[in-house]
Amino acid sequence: MAKERFKVIVAVYLLLEQEGKVLLMRRANTGFMDGMYGFPAGHHDGGEDLKLAAAREAYEELGITIDPQDLSFSFLLHRPFAKDGDRLDVYFTISRFTGEISNKEPEKCDDIAWFSLDALPDSAIFNVRMVLEARKRGESFAIHND
């Protein structure tokens, strides 16, 4: 009998950057970090490549179309001790997209705003500052123990 393989939860994150600013969304009505700002993100559904998952999330959450070829790998965050199991968070940077950014999930998000990289909101989720600061140092990987 074959041993069942370990499974990990994978999420994709979008770092939309323009003119020294990054786009963040404020969570609402989700039961997880509501009132906090985070990157547009979503779970990898399986059976799709990571860039397609990120492009899908951009459309589902923001109503914008991204060519997966325009996505650049930016950062990998491993969270081995998350409450619901090991997590891998894959971050992609994007600056080109088509369409106008809008809130396509108002039941999960009550604000979308551009923030200066030097003036992030106090209510930013832990990974926002951590990932942006690590990238400034030229790092592309971190482990975070939830």
Image: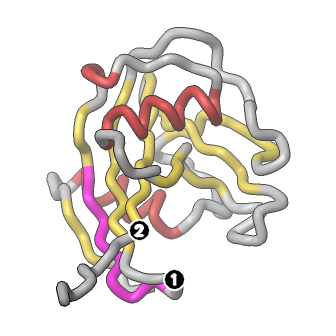
Q: Quadrant of the C terminus?
A: bottom left
Q: Amino acid at mark 1?
A: Asp
First in sequence, mark 1 or 2: give its number: 2
Q: How many marks?
A: 2
Quadrant of residue 62 in the image?
A: top right
Prevalent SS, magenta region:
strand
Q: Give the x, y percent position of residue 77.
A: 31, 65
Does residue 74 appear to the left or right of 82 in the view shown? left
Is 134 above or below relative to 118?
below
For the magenta stretch, what is the residue range? 75-82
Q: Amino acid at mark 2?
A: Ile
User: Does the magenta run of residues contain 79?
Assistant: yes
Residue 84 circle label: 1
Does residue 123 appear to the left or right of 59 in the view shown? right
Q: Which residue is mark 2?
A: 9
**Which residue of the protein is positioned furthest toward the top in this rendering?**
98
Does residue 8 appear to the left or right of 106 in the view shown? left
Name the residue at 24% across, 80% down. Answer: 5
